[in-house]
Image (tube, rainbow, N blue to C red):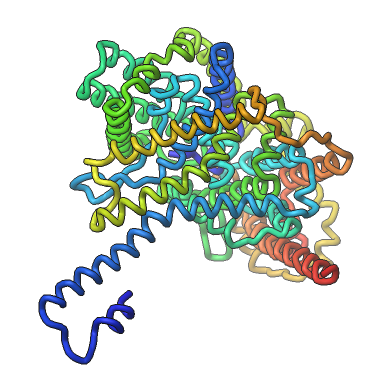
Amino acid sequence: MHMADALISPVVGGAMWVVTAGVAAYSIGKIKNDLDDKKIPLMGVMGAFVFTAQMINFAIPATGSSGHLGGGLLLSIILGPYAGFLTMASILAIQALFFADGGLLALGCNIFNLGFFTCFIAYPLIYKQIMRKGYSQSRMFSAAILAAVIGLQLGSLSVVLETLFSGKTELPFSTFLLLMQPIHLAIGVVEGLITAAVVGFVWKVCTEIIEKASPGEALGSISMKKVLSGLIVVALFTGAILSWFTSSYPDGLEWSMFKTAGVDELESVGRVHETLGDMQEKIAFLPDYGFKASESWDKIESGQQEEAWPAVSTGTSISGVVGGLMTLILAGIIGMGIRVIKRRGNAGTA
Amino acid sequence: MQVLLKGKLGGAKAPPQIFREQIAVFRRSGYVFLWGLVLHMKDIMKSLYNIRLLDELAEKQTVVHSIHPLAKLLTTMIYLIVVVSFGKYEVAGLLPLIFYPVIIIALAEIPLLPILKRMLLVAPFALGIGAFNPIFDNATMFVLGGFRLSGGWVSFFSITIKLFLALMGTLTLIVTTGMDRLAAALRMLRVPRIFVLQLLLTYRYISLLMEEVARTMQAYSLRAPFHHGVQPGVWGSLAGNLFLRTLQRAQSVYQAMVQRGFIGEYNTGYDSRMTINDTLYLCGWVVFFLTVRFYNIPVFIGSLVTGVGK
């Protein structure tokens, strides 16, 4: 469910960074006062535990496949929602940095999708409410499964919305939703079962760990009203900017470029071409009339489809292919060149 | 294993029936042993190996490694923003951005293979989503002679290039900076102490716990040879035992930290300020990124070479 940088737009990525940083700052503020030094190593080691436990394959009976632990719910149950959220954030940051699993720009989205919904919605509103009547094995199992399923459903819905708002995919909303939600229903059930199995075992062996942890009181009780109202303000604010940016222009950066420079990029490139027109004629070593012929066809074609954006242009296409290849070759030569020079330098010093 | 069994147990004379069954069991267990080692240990030990490899690479002494971590972090973030800011149908304009990772990887003497392998492992999800574009977007976008390419394919290529550029950008950051110096950069950006400390501790103990999980999984796979993954009956006890051992370790870690003077602050040991070189590094790359963003250099070069203007 980790989103990659390539699928989000800077506006969505930035907005989710702001929202996630807000939730993280709120969580830090909540745990700062009543956090003893002992909790920090516990959070660190618990983060490492969830990180490594995610690598264990849990066999799912009768399917032949295996599932994994996500860990958000387990962290909330053991550490409380605030510390759980922060721990989840650092796990995802390490995954993004060392395993390239989810990008750095998409990190805000990923922390929100995988941390916020489990720690701040599923845990306090479902798990804790069901467990209020006291611990029993069956109650804990149903609470964990329900909480994990709802947490993951909200998370995957959020993935769908963030991806669609970014506008990089052509997948229609309903198709994407139909692809994501059922898969995450199954993943949620497995997540709930694994979490419940771990909590159940720890309860049997060492009841006080769960007893002490489950009320989460040591880390402050949660005020959903504050969290939600804060989030709504941030979401509305960023949403307003988002829609303003995306309504008329392909993306925000192009809009700002247009605003500041007064020209858009194709025009300026066109002017450069015009100035260097004569030079082109002289230095062109791959002139081909075929391109020009198809260009005239292309003009008719683009004339018929004036509304289409960006317009189809053979000239740009061929220039792009040739120039692109030359760029890549040049990058390769520079990379190899630096390596050869460095190797010679190292050999010289050795 | 098969060679070993044949060599030691298979002779000119066929062994009696009773031995044949034992040999078959032995052979099967041998395969399963290897399979268990390969499958269960593979992921975890591979990840551990990868983390250690990246750690080692981050310790190199090259010109890129010596750049201030804050300059590298900011450069990477701006790079990523520029990469994803390109329009969904942009392909050629993106390509010059490859100069950044290529130059950094070459200057920092980073082996290319592990970076490429890592990228290929994580690519499928994003590419899977992108692969729907050619199905839903059929309008012609690219024409070359008689060859036409739909907008869906163009946007799919764009996603693929963006994915690889972003992955390379991120991996180059960690490979040339390392976790400790990156944490120092985060502190300089005023990221709260608790979070940075927690992030570093998580990172530190991942290697430690991975070894433990790998050992547990190895023990499990040897005792339950024909099972694919941990069976539901022992989900709780296996992961739960690991959890309890982790808690115990957290306590001893805390005691050890207190004995060494831990007062809630983690010293990253990196306190230098950005020099002119660091600022030049940052500004130089930013100017390059913005130039690439606002001028389609490949199309420009291509039009110069082919003589086809726009």
**Position in image of residue A182 (x %, y %):** 29, 36
Residue pictured at 54% horizontal, 45% vertical: A305
Residue located 46% across and 48% down the image: B211
Residue B183, how many percent across, how many down? 67, 35
Residue A307 seen: no
Up-down relation of residue B132 to residue B107 (above or below): above
Q: Is residue A255 above or below residue B204?
A: above
- Between residues B17 and A235, which one lies in front from this camera angle? B17
Residue A332 image-quadrant placement: bottom right
Quarter of the figure with the N terminus of chain B: bottom left
Q: Which residue corresponds to the image point at 73% horizontal and 34% vertical from the top-left?
A: A257
- Which of A172/B69 is in front? B69
Spot the residue most to the bottom. Answer: B12
As drawn, which residue projects farthest toward the right?
A: B276
Q: Is residue B48 above or below residue A119?
A: below
Return the residue nearer the eye: B190 or B131. Answer: B190
Q: Position of residue B258 (x, y in %)?
A: 61, 26
The reply to whether residue A321 is in sight is yes
* Residue A219 left/right relative to A207: right
Residue A126 percent coordinates (x, y): 32, 18
Q: Is residue B191 above or below residue A276?
A: above
